Image (cartoon, helix red, strand yellow):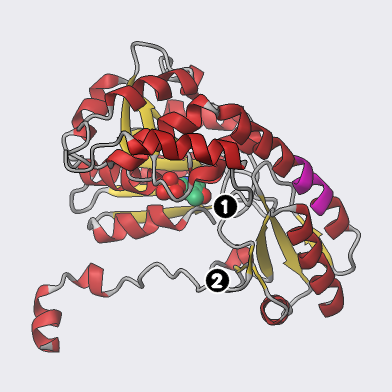
Amino acid sequence: MSSKVDKWIRPEVRALRAYQVPDAKGLIKLDAMENPYSWPPELVEAWLTRLRGVTLNRYPDPRARELAIRLTDYLGLAPDQGLILGNGSDELIQLVILALAAPGRVVMAPEPTFVMYRMIAGFAGMDYYPVALRSDFALDLPAVKAAMERLQPAVVFLAYPNNPTGNLWDELDLTEVLRAAPGLVVIDEAYYPFAGRSWISELGSYDNLLVMRTVSKLGLAGLRLGMLAGPPAWIEQIDKLRLPYNINVLTQVTAAFALEHGSVLDEQAAAICAERDRLGRTLMALPGLEVFPSQANFLLLRTAPGRAGEIFEGLLHRGVLIKNLDGSAPALADCLRVTVGRPEENEAFLNALREIL
Ligand SMILES: *Cc1c(COP(=O)(O)O)cnc(C)c1O
């Protein structure tokens, strides 16, 4: 059997390591940038009432039109811009790459960054070219421009703020990337709820800019809903690759409902930002930890040399799951990433960490 697998499964697929999601059962889960808050009971009741009206025996609206109208408003999208919805922004990254994929074509991104750009480029048979960030995780603009000039990437992905570093890049640098890029530039604003900075208003100004958003980090990670906005000429082409009913009916109804009650999610995001700043200050006062500035709902930490693994395991042993980034990229040596949780979760994390340090 394995010889047939080896013969027929494409080498680039066999070479991939499946995306690992650790089991978090019984643990304080501070590893995946989820919003730690649930909804107030009366909102849950109103949502369940709304779900009663859903017709599960029928296919969903193939274009999710009602939801798309609501999202256009939520995004502040100009009427002359296009919008496509995805089963999470992960699916949208895949659609963009599938629309561009051909042997020898290049996907580029600064690194370290979100791993899905590399993974999807790999399984779509495109070449992935990372450009190293500076040691403070700023964009290395001359290096990016030189690499674009040399390799003519079909698309450059820019996570803004970046994951796992948490920072926003300089706006003028991004403007220069947009001007110099030979192909598409996708600005991935997954952490917009915590950064408040967006390129949506620039969508008319460049012929190669697409902006991506998701409701995942805002507090609806279970729904799987991403948005890709930009010039209709691009969006119409990418939309051809979308499977007809990619946004299921429960997601369509629930996301529309959640946006009607958007202030609940906005207040949660504000609480997370306040908690992020408090957690950051507390961590900075601990010995032997470097805390990087963050505009997202997580913090990147650097431990004393060689201690990241031991600290990660120590936290796990005390019931707290974070993310160990040590070994995932040279720039992330000794690095850990912690998602901002509820105050009592952050306190449990801090207490465990104090014990270990
Ligand atoms: C988490 C994350 C995503 C994934 O979003 P989904 O909508 O849940 O697929 C996309 N981009 C970045 C940079 C992320 O960190």
Q: Residue 291, percent across and down?
A: 78, 56
Q: Residue 84, percent across and down?
A: 30, 31
Position of 118 relative to 259 (above/below): below
SS of the residue under disc 1: loop
Q: Can the viewer see residue 163 in this picture?
A: yes
Side (left or right) of 45 relative to 353: left
> Mark 1 packing: few (<14 Cα in 10 Å), some, or many (20+)?
many
Residue at 44% x, 51% y is 222
Q: Residue 26, percent across and down?
A: 60, 73
Position of 51 relative to 342 (above/below): above
Q: Residues under labels 2 and 1: Cα distance?
A: 13 Å
Q: Quadrant of the N terminus?
A: bottom left
Residue topped by disc 2: 24
Residue topped by disc 1: 34
Amino acid type, residue under disc 2 in the picture: Ala
Quadrant in which residue 334 is drawn: bottom right
Residue at 67% x, 60% y is 338
Tell me, yes or no, whether the highlighted magenta stretch contains residue 277: yes
Q: Quadrant of the C terminus?
A: bottom right
Q: Which mark is residue 126?
A: none
Numbered range of the magenta stretch: 274-279
Quadrant in which residue 89 is drawn: top left
Magenta region, main secondary structure: helix
